[in-house]
Amino acid sequence: MAYKIVYSDVALADMDKAWDEIYEASKDIDIADNYIKTLRVNLKEISKHPGTGARLHYEDMFTGIYYVTHKKYSAFYRIVGDRIQVGRVLYNKSEYIKRVIDTM
């Protein structure tokens, strides 16, 4: 059984921003579309076994937050019951730990 994937409003806005950034860099709608589509496919794959995602640690402690990465972006999620709650989708080189922990 796959867990249901639920995106927060912030995560959806993050994906829109990521799409814009990818489009600006590539000037190609298909590249931007496929990039976001692949990130969603990666989440769908992980939904079969959500605990196998990478674990986000802060000060050597597991935060309860997992993530899946596609190239330069990561989707951060929590497992709540039978759902994967995606809270943020952020550029990997950003100061993401504080942003993720503060918003999830």
Image (cartoon, grey):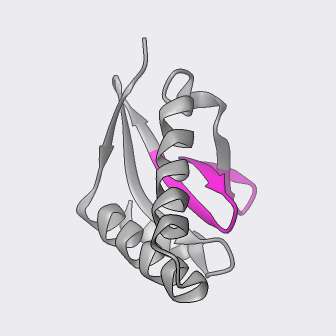
Can residue 84 be found in the magenta stretch?
no
| Residue found at the very far right of the displayed protein | 60
Provide the major secondary structure of the magenta segment: strand
Residues 21 and 61: in front is: 21
Percent position of residue 15, x then y: 40, 67
Q: Is residue 55 above or below residue 22?
A: above
Above or below, 12 against 49 in this view is: below
In the image, 64 versus 77, the foreground residue is 77
Q: Residue 62, how many percent across, how many down?
A: 64, 47
Q: Quadrant of the N terminus?
A: top left
For the point 72% across and 63% down, the residue is 59
Residue 81 sits in quarter: top left
Residue 22, image quadrant: bottom right
Q: Does the magenta portion include 64? A: yes
| Residue found at x 55% / y 49% | 38
Quadrant assignment for the C terminus: bottom left
Q: Is residue 13 left or right of residue 23?
A: left
Residue 32 in picture, x, y percent from top left: 50, 69
Residue 101 horizontal/vertical position (percent): 48, 65
Name the residue located 44 percent from the left edge and 43 percent from the top edge. 78
Specify the farthest residue to the bottom: 24
Residue closest to the far left? 9
Q: What's drawn in magenta, residue-wise?
A: 56-77
Task: Count every numbered label the image shows and give the total.
Answer: 0
